[in-house]
């Protein structure tokens, strides 16, 4: 399995979106945001130690949905969006925690 998970402590998003063009059946939306992703990995050494690695990645992200098709009835509305995004890594962090007994011989 991938060490990068949806752990609530390690992953979150914040940002805002603007619907630049708003029509009854279609629209254009732009989103800007901050994304933090990360994961945990645990390694067991033969000498009894357990090493836990925590990795965090920080991104600025811009999304553009050039085509948003609005479907449904007046009471229940949904949408289908097609588009892409670009992200720039702002930072990277990695920490190690050692637990257990034994020696590093």
Image (cartoon, rainbow, N blue to C red):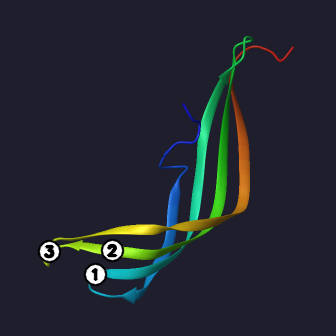
The image position of residue 38, as x and y in percent, is 60, 47
| Quarter of image, res 69 | bottom left
The image position of residue 10, as x and y in percent, is 55, 49
> Nearer the N terminus, badge 3 or badge 1?
1
Of 71 and 60, nearer the camera is 71
**Label 2 residue SS:** strand
Q: Mark 3 points at which residue?
A: 73
Of 56 and 19, nearer the camera is 19
Q: Residue 69 carries which label?
A: 2
**Label 3 residue SS:** loop
Q: Which mark is residue 2?
A: none
Q: Which mark is residue 25?
A: 1
Residue 11 in the figure: left or right of residue 78: right
Identify the residue at horizontal 59%, vertical 36% (top origin). Answer: 3
Q: In this view, does 59 lie above or below 100?
A: below
Residue 6 in the figure: left or right of residue 60: left
The image position of residue 43, as x and y in percent, is 67, 24
Alpha carbons under labels 1 and 2: distance apart: 6 Å
> Nearer the N terminus, badge 1 or badge 2?
1
Of 54 and 65, nearer the camera is 65
Instruction: Count residues near mark 2 (Cα–Cα under 10 Å), then give few for <14, some for 14-19, many for 20+.
Output: some
**Label 1 residue SS:** loop
Alpha carbons under labels 3 and 1: distance apart: 11 Å
Q: Is residue 87 above or below residue 32?
A: above
């Amino acid at each position: 399995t991938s060490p990068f998970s949806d752990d609530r402590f390690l992953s979150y998003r914040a940002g805002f979106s603007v619907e630049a063009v708003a029509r009854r059946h279609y629209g254009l939306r732009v989103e800007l945001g901050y994304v933090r992703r990360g994961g945990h990995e645990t390694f067991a050494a033969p000498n009894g130690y357990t090493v836990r690695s925590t990795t965090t990645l920080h991104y600025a992200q811009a999304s553009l949905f050039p085509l948003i098709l609005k479907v449904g009835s007046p009471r229940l509305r949904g949408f289908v969006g097609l588009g892409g995004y670009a992200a720039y890594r702002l930072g990277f962090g990695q920490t190690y925690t050692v637990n257990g007994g034994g020696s590093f011989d």
